[in-house]
Image (cartoon, helix red, strand yellow):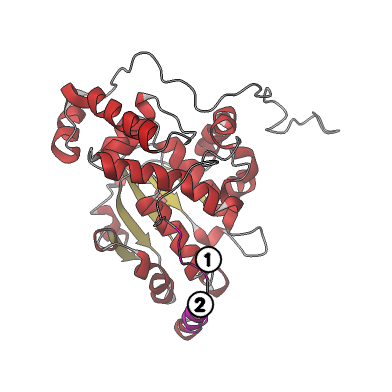
Amino acid sequence: MEDPKGRTDATSRLKPVTNVSFPAPPPPIYSCTLTAELVAKAREELQEKPEWRLRDVQALRDMIMKEQPNLRTRLDDAFLLRFLRARKFDYDRALQLLLNYHGSRRAWPEVFQDLKPSTVKHVLDLGFLTVLPRPDPQGRYILCLRPGKWKPNDYPFVDNIRAIYLTLEKLIQPEETQVNGIVILVDYNGVGLSQASNPGPLLSKKVVGILQDGFPIRIKAVNIINEPRIFKGIFAIIKPFLKEKMAERFVLHGSDLSSLHRVIPRSVLPEEYGGVAGHLDMSAWAHALLKAEEEFVVEFCQPDPLEGTVLPDSMLFDGETGAHGEDSYRSLRSQLYYCY
């Protein structure tokens, strides 16, 4: 559909997806795309043995079909490998991660309902996030977040979370990312009190819960730059929900770009962060996501995959409501005002 000026929106160019069955049958043959170097790295860091890889996938598939026969999840080799690699080929932990992955959709419908790139185009256009075009020397792609670009009156904060989740889904597709992991770079330039008081403790718990226990990706480092004085209050919201190992991966650089360059070389950073890789380009990643619209429609715009499934008693987002959470929010907001 074109408007009077002849422009065509992103969704109208897409062919409708019909008669989609979920899950799709696994492909007949899995072909590993890892280099010899990455195969060795996966063996050392993830306990992945190439000669046992498909046997391990089949073992996880058998567990799913036996213990969760009603779970409408993909069962193909490539998909299940994401969860095995994220949990170092521990079958039980990989299955729990898979259940958390699907459980987050039911627990947080405002994020996952109708989740597709065209619904977060405004987030991408604003420049809230992008992925740098070149990975670092360890092969890790760098997700760059700029929360100062978002203002509370622009749109709900949950739209930022939707854009982050779609980005993670796209990043995790290549096997190289499953082995190498990713790095997050957060630029707090321009963040004031209005942004700092969002998302609050309850929303923060959900975000951290997904990143730590509900998504099959390895976050190897979180680099914070240009953090304001109020970041002490922001981190106070997040830290209680971080596991010790993840908390240790947060590195605060302030405005000292030389500190950042010690962990992310200038060769892969844009000029805005003292690098030599050209100006920060927000459009390339936005285009890559929007181009993948149909695959996200198939993946996320389907019936609830947990319908009819009995989940374990302890799940990802239990116990998040109540007076304690509200009291914590008021206390932390007071901290932010004090720091500001």
Residue pictured at 34% horizontal, 14% vertical? 29
330 in the magenta segment:
yes
**How many numbered callouts?**
2
State how far apart marks 1 and 2 are (Cα).
10 Å
Q: Secondary structure at mark 2?
A: helix
- Which quadrant would residue 198 be assigned to in this image? bottom right
Three-letter amino acid code of the residue under disc 1: Pro
Q: Main secondary structure of the magenta part?
A: helix
Task: Name the residue type under label 2.
Answer: Tyr
Q: Residue 152 location, x and y as percent?
A: 63, 65
Q: Which residue is mark 1?
A: 199
Badge 1 crowding class, 10 Å Cα cut-off, few under 14, some 14 to 19, many 20 or more, is some
Residue 202, percent across and down? 49, 67
| Quadrant in which the N terminus is drawn | top right
Provide the residue designation for mark 2: 329
The residue closer to the viewer here, 297 or 338, is 297
The region drawn magenta spans 317-334
Q: Position of residue 27 (x, y in %)?
A: 40, 17
Q: Is residue 25 magenta?
A: no
Furthest-right residue in this view? 4
Q: Nearer the viewer, mark 1 or mark 2?
A: 2
